[in-house]
Amino acid sequence: MQAVALIHEEDGAFGVSFPDFPGATTVGRSIDEALAKAVEALAFHIEGLAEDGDVPEARTLSQLKCDPIFNEDAKGAAVAYVPYSPPTKAARVNLTFDEGLLVRIDAAASATGKTRSGFLAEAARERLIGFGGSPKKVAGRRRSGRQIRK
């Protein structure tokens, strides 16, 4: 699936927003960087909406052009399609944790009003930003999160 994105340039920075997904925004130093970040920002935003149970259907550009608010927002903007995958149903998994770590996870989840699964899913989504689905090092850390010694 694809969502329509609006790209505005201001003072050399490029901002991306999604008319059908208010609150999903990102910025880049170039159009290419902004669009690359937009894919991740939209995916993260849609996952959050799915947790709340309300993911709107993305409209086509033709449908959006009939919307006066879109037409106003689109003035001076470039338009792009950004791909996304709609959320799928949850899958049950069996994980093993250090007992002390599990106690800390449960306390943090409780303090934030989340379930253990919800807390871990959110932590995983935050950690996966920038990975683009492929394993790679990020800022001197292995995928496990342990510091790499030099």
Image: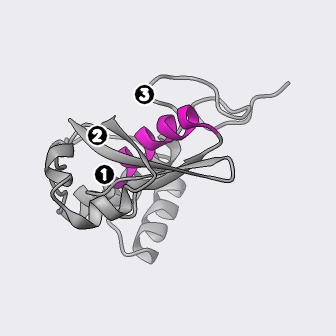
Give residue 107's position: percent from left, percent from top: 47, 70
Amino acid type at circle 1 is: Glu
Callout 2–callout 1 Cβ contact below 8 Å: no
Measured Cα–Cα span from mark 2 to mark 1: 21 Å
Using the image, tell me which numbered label, if any, was put on residue 133: 3
Rendered image coloring scheme: one colour
Badge 3: residue crowd in 10 Å (few <14, some 14–19, many ≥20): few
What secondary structure is marked by label 1?
helix
Measured Cα–Cα span from mark 3 to mark 2: 21 Å
Amino acid type at circle 2 is: Asn
Where is the C terminus found, in terms of image quarters? Answer: top right
**Which residue is at 30% across, 52% downward?**
46
Give residue 34's position: percent from left, percent from top: 53, 41
Give the answer, above or below, for where 63 lies relative to 39: below
Q: Would residue 9 be found to the left or right of residue 64 on screen?
A: right
**Which residue is at 47% across, 60% downward?**
105
Give residue 104's position: percent from left, percent from top: 52, 63
